[in-house]
Image (spheres, rainbow, N blue to C red):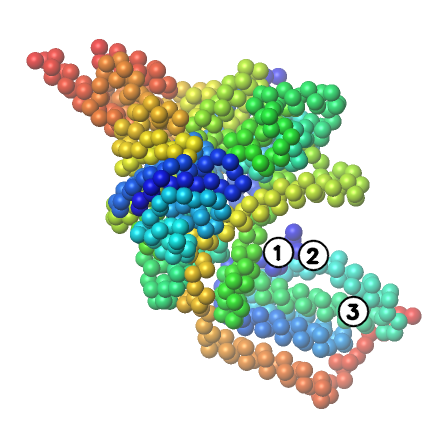
């Protein structure tokens, strides 16, 4: 699953890694707004390039490249479908849609690459989401490696009984996956009961209001970056409205006939 | 804790999981609770923290007073402040992606102040020697380390009673021994009551002060480890080889002054026996 | 060919960075009962996964009944190597106990009448006959364990590998597993048990292979390996009590022979000593 490589946290020491996760999330949101705001090819390309700058600052070029390679089929699909179905300006439009998707993936990839699962949990808890929900999300993330290990063991056990997963036509293969899913689902349901029991034994449910010493606190650096990125985003948005952008932004590629 | 004529049947089942169990235990005891699979030991553990009857449904009869609370009338989250339960699989007891926050989790639940939480977390990590693991996620830890973190998370709540349900099942012998010895020092230093559910008697017997054997929902033996292990009723459990050896020697007429629970104890006993023989031979 | 399994210079890594197996050399003769021992993380499970081709060597080779595992599929190798994993809940694939035991037989293409016969035999052997039509998930832990063994024995592979069969089992269950081991030996099967249960190994095994840090640090007759306390220490294992006692008595100069494994032997030696 090399596609997911660009979303898995790695412990590194970079300015981005030490930034408050809420600020990083806001940056990803800013990128989302900007990518949706522009339909022209050149601005979208510049947006994508700027995410690459962030990736380099985060020293995560390798993981990022793997994800970009992984989403290549999706990019081609988006380009292809748009190219076929759109009438006017098909090349530019298809390119824009492709770039948009790539930028979104890239921006969120930066967020996930530089944020620990734990910081994600803290970010949620510090942002006003009820504890029950943020805990649910945190635990779901925490158990992903566990689930993937269980899946591997079940597949190994199946194969050891002479079972061939990749045999047969599409229908047969789908049925084959049932042999994996049934034990996996039952196993994980059992697991969740045991987790629920352990949660009870840890006093969960005693209080709603929790006084935690691990709340996230914004430092000056975090405020600075947040202010900068918000300001820049607003500037770019408004300059399009008031028409203050240079004309070459609106240049289009020549359309094939 | 005091249990009297305790009986329990899980809903939907016909047989009694607990059959007229009576038991008293006080602080400072390190009790080994053992018996064949299905004998009711895990059920008993769950009663002591109130998971039965509040989490598992069924019919619970009799009296159960634990840490001064009536189990049947006290919710689990109140009992959790006084009774800590460590389960078999550490994987299912570590909920967060960070050891330090995991240890704090229970403390946050019971509503302590941030300052108190910080203090207790630091203290517990230092006591169990896991400070160096504080930023790790569960998948970065070995089985033994995970179990230590689980124990730390429960100990941080400073319960008077600590129950461990087969905590070493997935551990290799060295890690298992480390955990069992750790509990022994905790009992000695903090004066808590520890109840250990375990099959591996050859590792556990030497640490505990009392052994209780259960079978089919009832307690069939309860007392000093050296006596209980010699009781013929102990045949259904895995009596350590050193005890079997001593018993056989007794049968051939060679009596050791005390039933040994470890190889070293056995050899000491043999050594003193040999010295006695030599002394009487000389005289 | 006397070798059931031959491993030469085996190197393996999961992620390309750290080597979990570093130059393993070992073999298992047909009909032997061998224990592969070591602490968690020594590489035991990784090693046995090479025996049915679930993992392929990065360097070196593994030959099962003469076949190179790099050139065979898991399905083919499974015909000869039955693998029982540690946790029964990961290995339940049938709607009923009967279908569960049938599973491997059907995958491997056995004829209907053979399937029926073998299933009946395996169920009877593991005392699971009465649960034939029940869902595997309604069985107790001990029964599920017997079921996974039955499912593998049913198709009668020549080599049977068990990963930690006694983990979490009570004394009676361990006895049952020991009986199964005896039965397999009687039928001249090759049995490989991965375990750190030294007491179990002391009773039921011919040869012991010790692993530590991805390497084989010793192998030999169980009487030689289990009584060598220094070796067991290197493998981070706690010695079985009887050899431990014998070793201590030997150190004190009280007895000569310290290669003692069974309670009876030691009783005899001590009775003689007292005389």
Q: Would residue B75 appear left or right of A60 to someone viewing this image?
A: left
CA gap, disc 2 and disc 1: 9 Å
Q: Position of residue A40 (x, y in %)?
A: 76, 76
Report which residue position mark 1 lands on.
Answer: A5
Identify the residue shown where x is 83% and y is 63%: A81
Q: Position of residue A152 (x, y in %)?
A: 61, 43
Q: In front: C231, or B23?
A: B23
Identify the residue shown where x is 62% and y is 72%: A29
Report which residue position mark 2 lands on.
Answer: A70
Q: Secondary structure at mark 1?
A: helix
10 Å neighbourhood of mark 2: few (<14), some, or many (≥20)? some
Can residue B45 be seen by looking at this rendering? no
Please report contact status of discs 3 and 1: CB closer than 8 Å, yes or no: no
Labels 2 and 3 within one chain: yes
Quarter of the image for the C terminus of chain A: give it: bottom right
10 Å neighbourhood of mark 1: few (<14), some, or many (≥20)? many
Q: Position of residue B270 (x, y in %)?
A: 22, 21
Mark before the other along the chain sequence, 2 or 1: 1
**Relative vertical location of residue C5 with respect to residue A59 in this rendering, above or below:** above
CA gap, disc 2 and disc 3: 18 Å
Quadrant for residue B25, please give it. top left
Q: Would residue A143 appear left or right of C212 to someone viewing this image?
A: right
């Amino acid at each position: 699953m090399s596609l997911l490589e660009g979303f898995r946290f790695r412990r590194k020491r970079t300015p981005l890694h030490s930034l408050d996760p809420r600020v990083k999330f806001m940056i990803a949101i800013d990128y989302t707004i900007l990518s949706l705001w522009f339909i022209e090819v050149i601005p979208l390309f510049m947006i994508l390039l700027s995410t690459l700058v962030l990736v380099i600052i985060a020293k995560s070029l390798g993981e990022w490249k793997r994800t970009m390679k992984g989403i290549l089929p999706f990019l081609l699909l988006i380009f292809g479908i748009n190219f076929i179905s759109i009438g006017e300006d098909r090349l530019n439009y298809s390119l824009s849609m492709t770039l948009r998707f790539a930028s979104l993936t890239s921006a969120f990839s930066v967020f996930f690459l530089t944020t620990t699962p734990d910081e994600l949990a803290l970010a949620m808890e510090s942002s006003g989401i009820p504890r029950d929900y943020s805990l649910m999300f945190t635990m779901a993330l925490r158990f992903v490696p566990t689930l993937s290990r269980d899946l591997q063991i079940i597949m190994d056990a199946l194969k050891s009984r002479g079972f061939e997963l990749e045999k047969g036509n599409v229908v047969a293969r789908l049925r084959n996956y049932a042999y994996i899913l049934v034990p996996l689902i039952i196993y994980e349901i059992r697991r969740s009961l045991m987790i629920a029991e352990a949660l009870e034994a840890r006093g969960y449910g005693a209080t709603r209001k929790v006084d935690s010493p691990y709340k996230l606190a914004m430092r000056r650096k975090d405020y600075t970056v947040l202010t900068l990125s918000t300001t820049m985003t607003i500037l770019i948005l408004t300059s399009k409205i008031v028409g203050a952008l240079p004309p070459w932004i609106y240049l289009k590629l020549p359309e094939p006939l | 804790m005091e249990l009297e004529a305790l009986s329990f049947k899980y809903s939907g089942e016909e047989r009694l999981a607990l059959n007229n169990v009576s038991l008293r235990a006080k602080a400072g005891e390190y009790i080994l609770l053992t018996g064949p699979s299905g004998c009711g030991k895990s059920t008993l553990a769950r009663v002591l923290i109130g998971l039965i009857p509040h989490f598992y449904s069924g019919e619970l009869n009799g009296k159960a007073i634990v840490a001064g609370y009536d189990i049947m009338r006290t919710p689990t989250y109140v009992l959790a402040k006084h009774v800590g339960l460590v389960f078999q699989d550490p994987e299912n007891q570590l909920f967060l992606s960070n050891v330090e926050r995991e240890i704090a989790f229970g403390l946050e639940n019971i509503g302590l102040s941030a300052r108190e939480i910080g203090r207790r977390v630091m203290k517990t990590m230092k006591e169990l020697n896991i400070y160096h693991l504080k930023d790790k996620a569960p998948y970065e830890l070995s089985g033994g380390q995970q179990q230590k973190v689980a124990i730390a998370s429960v100990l941080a709540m400073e319960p008077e009673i600590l129950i461990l349900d087969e905590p070493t099942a997935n551990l290799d012998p060295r890690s298992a021994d480390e955990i069992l010895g750790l509990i022994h020092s905790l009992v000695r230093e903090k004066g808590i009551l520890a109840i250990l559910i375990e099959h591996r008697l050859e590792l556990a017997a030497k640490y505990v002060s009392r052994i209780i054997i259960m079978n089919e929902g009832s307690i069939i033996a309860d007392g000093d480890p050296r006596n209980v292990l010699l009781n013929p009723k102990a045949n259904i459990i895995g009596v350590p080889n050193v005890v079997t050896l001593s018993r056989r020697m007794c049968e051939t007429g060679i009596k050791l002054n005390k039933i040994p629970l470890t190889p070293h104890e056995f050899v000491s006993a043999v050594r003193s026996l040999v010295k006695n023989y030599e002394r009487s031979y000389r005289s | 060919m006397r070798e059931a399994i031959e491993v030469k210079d085996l190197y393996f890594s999961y992620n390309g960075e750290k080597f979990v197996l570093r130059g393993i050399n070992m073999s298992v003769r047909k009909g032997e009962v061998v224990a592969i021992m070591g602490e968690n993380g020594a590489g035991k499970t990784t090693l046995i996964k090479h025996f049915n081709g679930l993992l392929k060597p990065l360097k070196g080779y593994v030959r099962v009944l003469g076949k190179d595992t790099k050139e065979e599929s898991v399905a083919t190798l499974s015909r000869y190597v039955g693998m029982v994993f540690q946790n029964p809940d990961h290995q339940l694939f049938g709607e009923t106990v009967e279908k569960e035991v049938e599973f491997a037989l059907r995958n491997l293409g056995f004829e209907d009448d053979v399937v029926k016969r073998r299933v009946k035999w395996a169920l009877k052997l593991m005392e699971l006959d009465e649960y034939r039509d029940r869902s595997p998930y309604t069985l107790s832990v001990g029964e599920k364990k017997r079921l996974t063994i039955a499912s593998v024995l049913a198709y009668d592979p020549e080599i049977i590998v068990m990963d930690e069969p006694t983990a979490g089992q009570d004394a009676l269950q361990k006895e049952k597993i020991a009986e199964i081991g005896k039965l397999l030996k009687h039928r001249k099967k090759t049995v490989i048990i991965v375990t750190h249960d030294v007491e179990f190994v002391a009773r039921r095994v011919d040869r012991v292979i010790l692993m530590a840090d991805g390497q084989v640090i010793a192998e030999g007759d169980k009487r030689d390996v289990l009584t060598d306390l220094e070796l067991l220490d290197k493998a981070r294992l706690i010695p079985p009590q009887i050899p431990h006692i014998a070793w201590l008595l030997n150190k004190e100069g009280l007895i000569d022979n310290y290669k003692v494994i069974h309670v009876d032997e030691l009783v005899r030696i001590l009775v003689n000593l007292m005389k």
